[in-house]
Image (spheres, grey):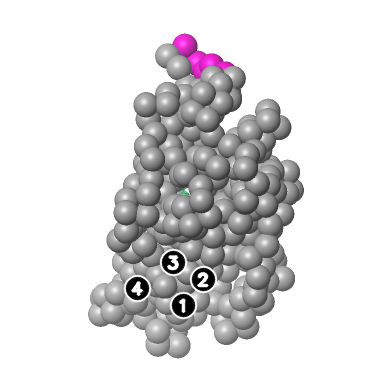
């Protein structure tokens, strides 16, 4: 270990995801075993706006958190220090973050977050903070990594929900519409939909034609399948239509999506004459204990991040590139979204077994 990398900060930013604690645990354990002191920063970059919002983490502090959902450090998706929300609009507190980083005697920063948080991390790297990024999102839409921890847990939960909805849909001969998360990408909808045997899967990448969806359901009815399961990503849009919002974006706060499931259910009920119900899985997908896959991936990411700090390799994001954990420039990740490719084999498989994707 080079002597200048002795004290490292770790923070979690953006929406939480199952596996965040597993990363923190790995960073603390691997860091301590390499002779580093690890400082946990609370509520994303807020922990670097005020040094009182930080604490030393020892292996003792992270014992038992591997299986815990959420993050022991807290998180926020409103705390971009470059555009900090204030009463009158927004303010740039980024210099204060750099100062606090120095005053705390930190030598490096491990930032665990999604696209927004990693973009902020990159900006701080350009301002001189030695940063290593760890990708996190249940949406699985970060470029450069085949998977993010949290995704597998979200898919498992959504699959279980679809299984449960199947029996009630079948009993009542209804259409059940399940709205899952996925702002810009349909990974959760596609994977959970396929794992749960959905009849229709609507993703943001393919604008849907509701008439074609209704026709598909009526064809099922005619051959005797009197119920249908429709999985819709929150970011799905009808052909020529817009995102369904709960609240619009405002300074420092991104728009909140939600409601597409109910819209689809209402439209299908009207067009098919079949009783329809909708269920929003929402934040249930972000809670609970991470799956074994996510615990292992999170632990590998955390250990790799510490290895990079030890080697003095900064401005990078750890990434899954099976069978290896690799690292790529943060600059290659910022501002990009990994959507489901239209030639993705699972999409092709869906079509070939007769699942409607709404086109
Ligand atoms: O980015 C993950 C995600 O789960 C999105 O799919 C969803 O739109 C968003 O978080 C909701 O975040 P929050 O309710 O915390 O603002």
Q: Which residue is mark 2?
A: 191
- Which label's residue is closer to the chain start, 1 or 3? 1
Determine whether the residue tagged by mark 3 lies in a helix, strand or loop: helix
The residue at the point 54 percent across, 60 percent down is 303
Q: CA distance from mark 4 to mark 1?
A: 9 Å
Determine whether the residue tagged by mark 2 lies in a helix, strand or loop: helix
Task: State yes or no: discs 1 and 2 in contact (Cβ < 8 Å).
Answer: yes
Name the foreground residue: 239 vs 332. 332
Mark yes or no: residue 27 visible: no
Q: Which residue is mark 3?
A: 295
- Which label's residue is closer to the chain start, 2 or 4? 4
Q: Which residue is mark 4?
A: 160
- Which label's residue is closer to the chain start, 2 or 3? 2
Count of numbered badges drawn on the protein: 4
Structural crowding at the residue carrying mark 2, measured as other residues with C-alpha within 10 Å and reported as few (<14), some (14–19) or many (≥20): many
Task: State yes or no: discs 2 and 3 in contact (Cβ < 8 Å).
Answer: no
Which percent across, then down, holds residue 171? 25, 80
Does the segment drawn in magenta span residue 96? no
The verdict on label 1 being within 8 Å of ligand 1 is no
Say left or right for 241 vs 331. Answer: left
Q: Which residues are magenta?
A: 88-93
Structural crowding at the residue carrying mark 3, measured as other residues with C-alpha within 10 Å and reported as few (<14), some (14–19) or many (≥20): many
Q: Which residue is mark 1?
A: 195
Q: CA distance from mark 1 to mark 3?
A: 21 Å
């Amino acid at each position: 270990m080079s002597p200048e990398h002795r004290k490292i900060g770790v923070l979690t930013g953006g929406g939480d995801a199952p596996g965040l604690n597993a990363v923190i645990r790995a960073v603390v354990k691997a860091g301590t075993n390499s002779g580093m002191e690890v400082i946990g920063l609370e509520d994303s970059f807020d922990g670097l706006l005020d040094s009182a919002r930080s604490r030393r983490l020892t292996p003792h502090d992270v014992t038992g958190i591997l299986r815990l959902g959420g993050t022991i450090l807290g998180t926020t998706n409103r705390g971009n220090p470059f555009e900090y929300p204030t009463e009158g609009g927004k303010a740039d507190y980024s210099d204060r973050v750099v100062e606090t980083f120095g005053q705390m005697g930190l030598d490096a920063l491990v930032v665990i977050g999604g696209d927004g948080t990693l973009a902020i991390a990159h900006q701080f790297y350009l301002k001189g903070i030695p940063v290593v990024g760890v990708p996190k999102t249940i949406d699985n839409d970060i470029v450069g990594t085949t998977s993010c921890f949290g995704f597998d847990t979200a898919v498992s939960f959504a699959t279980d929900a679809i299984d449960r909805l199947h029996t009630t849909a079948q009993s009542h001969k209804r259409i059940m519409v399940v709205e899952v998360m996925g702002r810009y990408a349909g990974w959760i909808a596609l994977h959970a939909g396929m794992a749960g045997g959905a009849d229709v899967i609507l993703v943001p990448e393919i604008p849907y034609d509701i008439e074609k969806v209704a026709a598909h359901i009526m064809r099922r009815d005619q051959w005797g399948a009197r119920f249908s399961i429709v999985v819709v990503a929150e970011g799905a849009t009808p052909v020529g239509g817009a995102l369904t919002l709960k609240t619009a974006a405002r300074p420092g706060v991104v728009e909140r999506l939600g409601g597409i499931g109910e819209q689809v259910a209402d439209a299908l009920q009207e067009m098919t004459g079949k009783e329809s119900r909708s269920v929003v899985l929402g934040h249930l997908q972000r809670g609970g204990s991470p799956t074994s896959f996510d615990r292992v991936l999170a632990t590998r990411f955390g250990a790799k991040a510490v290895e990079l700090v030890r080697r003095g390799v900064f401005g990078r994001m750890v990434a899954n590139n099976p069978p290896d954990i690799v690292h790529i420039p943060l600059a290659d990740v910022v501002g990009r979204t990994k959507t489901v490719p239209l030639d993705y084999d699972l999409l092709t498989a869906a079509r070939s077994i007769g699942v409607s994707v709404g086109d």
